[in-house]
Amino acid sequence: MSKQIIRNATVINEGISKVADVLINKDKIEKIDSIINISENYSEVDATGLWLIPGVIDDQVHFREPGLTHKADIYSESRAALAGGVTSYMEMPNVIPQTTTNELLEEKYLIGEKNSAVNYSFYLGATNFNLEELKRVNTENVCGANQHPVIRDEQACYMSSSLAVALAKKYNTRLHILHITSSSETGLFKNDIPLSDKRINV
């Protein structure tokens, strides 16, 4: 059966929670409503007392493929991610060979297409020698570029983090930092501003 109804789930989305049914059609959510009835055949899951939340996006993973698959690979780690509620990930370029060309990046996308259990994107590694590769990257598909601390020294890291913090303060927005490279940067950050309590109707 291509359709499934999840019954009586506590649906948590966009700042609110409510008990509802969820209709899934061919792996896509088709409808969320207090009670859903359809005439076609469908399977049913009783989710009474359970939460149903959006999938997590993990913006930094290390799945070690290619070249380091004795540690992990895209097949196994994407399934581990799915088991933990992660439905999308962005994978780093520190594999062998390092993902520093668009050709190597395309090879990783082919592995992802074949073996990943969830949505994926991959970072292109930035070096002192691959500026032209960075210029050619497809920004519609590639989640970003990643630099190694050998390329960005402590002073450069502090300056870039300082700028990011200043911009976040200027525009009154929250800031997520993937890496803190040096101890001097830790003094730039604090986590004492509570999340806003905005309520949005689904």
Image (cartoon, helix red, strand yellow):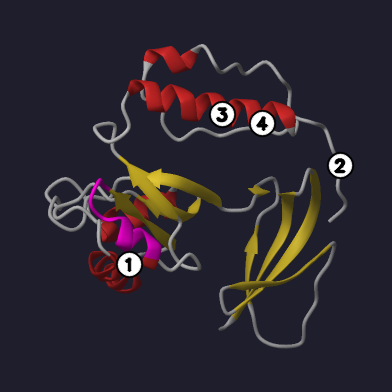
Mark 2, Cα crowd under 10 Å, few <14 / some 14-19 / many 20+, is: few
Of 106 and 44, which appears nearest the observer? 106
Amino acid of disc 3? Leu
Q: In the image, which is nearer the foreground, mark 3 or mark 4?
A: 3
Q: Residue at x 46, y 56 (%)?
A: 143
Of label 1 and label 2, which has the lower sequence position?
1
Q: Position of residue 49 (x, y in %)?
A: 69, 45
- Quickly name the residue at label 2: 199
Question: Image height check: is 93 above or below 115?
Answer: above
- Determine whether the residue tagged by mark 3 lies in a helix, strand or loop: helix
Amino acid of disc 4? Ala
Which numbered disc covers residue 112?
A: 1
**Label 3 to label 1: alpha-carbon separation:** 34 Å
From this viewpoint, which residue is outermost toward the bottom? 40
Q: Residue at x 65, y 47 (%)?
A: 50
- Quickly name the residue at label 3: 163
- Determine whether the residue tagged by mark 2 lies in a helix, strand or loop: loop
Mark 3, Cα crowd under 10 Å, few <14 / some 14-19 / many 20+, is: few
**Label 1 to label 2: alpha-carbon separation:** 37 Å
Q: Position of residue 91 (x, y in %)?
A: 35, 52
What's drawn in magenta, residue-wise? 127-135
Magenta stretch contains residue 167: no
- Determine whether the residue tagged by mark 1 lies in a helix, strand or loop: helix
- Determine whether the residue tagged by mark 4 lies in a helix, strand or loop: helix
